[in-house]
Amino acid sequence: MKKLRTLLLAACCLGLVLACSEAVDESQIVDLKSGNMYGADKTGADKMVTVPFKAEFSVWRAMPPGTGEACDDGHFRETMMGAGDITHLGEMTTFMTFCVDMATSEYALTELGYFVADNGDTLFIDVPSGQVLPGSDIDGYVAHFNDTMYFMGGTGRFDGAMGMALTNAYVYVGDGTEFRTDFWSEGHLTLKKGKR
């Protein structure tokens, strides 16, 4: 009787196991072990994160207008340098050179400009086309422009960076002795995760 009870119990357990089991897809086991299921990326490729970009900075003429390599006929060269504060850079300095069409006030950077953080990490920028417009809705400023500035990689934590921001810039002349442009730029910056 004891053997019969043990045999029946074993048969019931075996029946339950067979009734509850279903075919297992071996590829799912491999995916779970590798971490590739549900969007996990274990391939070693860099993971990127997009963060807000906000900047407040000013630039001044680094050289008199027209100084340096010549622009196309009807254009003049401007070289600007400045400083300010940018999210993900902190206190920074900047440098940019562009050519301006004297008739239309359209401009473009002649080479990549850059923002340099205190630790030396550099974010490269490009403005392939833009236009300075006369007038301003802010007292004291004589012109403005709001063109797209593209992030083009960099060094340190900005290696591989990309994104864009609008320049939102205003030109101040004052009494003619203090020519500067003030920027209140906003946009987004995509960086390698862990490098912010």
Image: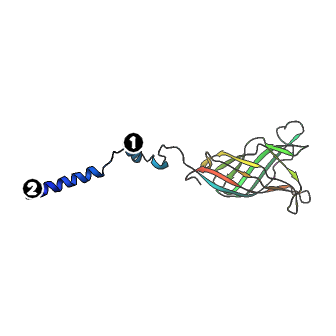
Instruction: Say which label, 1 or 2, has the lower sequence index.
Output: 2
Please tell me whether mark 1 or mark 2 is closer to you in this view.
2
Q: Secondary structure at mark 2?
A: helix
Q: Disc 1 versus disc 2: distance between alpha carbons?
A: 42 Å
The magenta stretch is 59-63
Q: Is residue 60 magenta?
A: yes
Label placed on residue 19: none
Q: Left or right: where does residue 178 sit relative to residue 84?
A: right
Q: Closer to the camera, 47 or 23?
A: 23
Decide: is 138 above or below 119.
Answer: below
Residue to which mark 1 is pinned:
27
Three-letter code for the amino acid on which mark 1 is drawn: Ser
Rendered residue at 17%/56% (across/down)? 9
Residue name at image x 82 percent, y 38 percent: 69
Question: In what element is the residue under mark 1?
Answer: helix
In x, y percent, where is residue 25? 37, 43
Q: In the image as oriented, which residue stretches furthest toward the top?
A: 73
| Nearer to us in this view, 154 or 13 | 13
Amino acid on which the number 2 mark rests in the picture: Lys
**Which x, y percent locates residue 80?**
80, 49
Disc sitting over residue 3 in the figure = 2
Residue 64 colored magenta? Answer: no
Position of residue 140 in the picture relative to residue 84 (left or right): right
